[in-house]
Image (cartoon, rainbow, N blue to C red):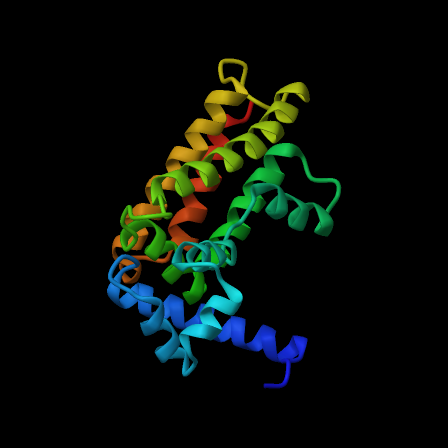
């Protein structure tokens, strides 16, 4: 059999990820087999193993597609305006994150991670959520420290508490929205909460 070109291999990998997203969302991760994913993509199980070691590896690749390191959101808003204050950068970065969350693929994959992924073999969804949360905390904390150094943060609020307040608010908002995404726009309601939180934190 002729070796696939890089473009063909990339297209096959993308087809498998799209199939995994759809089947995981419909059935849950534990109740989905690699055979089912391959059939859904119109491919063979051998194609799955060519690109992924196992179901855990495939699931990790899917989650990586929607990871939003806070620093990358910061870089995105700072690129548009390098003169932003630290608090304004945090505010706009959080808004940028909400815009991404309203994309259907982000919504489905994160819903799989939070509500349709059970503990089994090489997948621990709580560990994955903890890792993502810790990375976000450290990156956001660095910016709140800058805000404190520039005397922008209210005197009775430490950068650590400010970060935990913002992260807890966003986490609660996100979980409420994922339970019933049609109930409200996360961009509109989240935007109001983000703006209010930043105003309350300002000196």
Total of numbered circles in the picture? 0
Q: Residue furthest front?
A: 1
Question: Along the horizontal axis of the image, is 127 left or right of 99?
Answer: left
Residue at 52 percent of width and 69 percent of height: 50
Residue at 65 percent of width and 25 percent of height: 146
Quarter of the rendering occupied by the N terminus: bottom right
- Name which quarter of the figure residue 30 lies in: bottom left
Residue at 43 percent of width and 65 percent of height: 105
Q: Residue furthest top?
A: 156
Question: 109 or 202: which is nearer to us?
Answer: 109
Quarter of the rendering occupied by the C terminus: top right
Question: 12 or 2: which is nearer to us?
Answer: 2
Percent across and percent down for residue 80 are 71, 52
Residue at 41 percent of width and 36 percent of height: 130
Asked whether residue 32 is in view, the answer is yes
Question: Along the horizontal axis of the image, is 96 left or right of 180?
Answer: right
Q: Is residue 53 above or below residue 45?
A: above
Percent across and percent down for residue 65 are 51, 58
Q: Residue furthest bottom?
A: 1
């Amino acid at each position: 059999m002729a070796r696939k070109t890089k473009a063909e291999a990339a297209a096959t990998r993308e087809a498998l990820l799209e199939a995994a997203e759809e089947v995981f969302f419909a059935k849950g991760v534990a109740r989905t087999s690699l055979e089912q994913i391959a059939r859904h993509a119109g491919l063979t199980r051998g194609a799955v193993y060519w690109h992924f070691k196992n179901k855990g590896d495939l699931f990790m690749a899917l989650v990586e597609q929607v990871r939003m390191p806070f620093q990358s959101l910061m870089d995105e808003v700072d690129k548009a305006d390098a003169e932003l204050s630290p608090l304004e950068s945090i505010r706009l970065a959080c808004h940028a994150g909400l815009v991404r969350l309203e994309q259907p693929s982000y919504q489905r994959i994160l819903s799989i991670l939070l509500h349709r992924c059970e503990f089994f073999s090489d997948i621990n969804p709580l560990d994955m959520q903890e890792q993502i949360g810790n990375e976000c905390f450290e990156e956001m904390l660095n910016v709140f420290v800058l805000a404190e150094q520039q005397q922008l943060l209210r005197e009775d609020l430490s950068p650590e508490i400010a970060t935990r307040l913002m992260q807890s608010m966003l986490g609660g908002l996100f979980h409420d929205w994922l339970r019933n995404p049609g109930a409200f726009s996360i961009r509109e309601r989240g935007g109001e909460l983000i703006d209010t939180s930043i105003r309350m934190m300002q000196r």
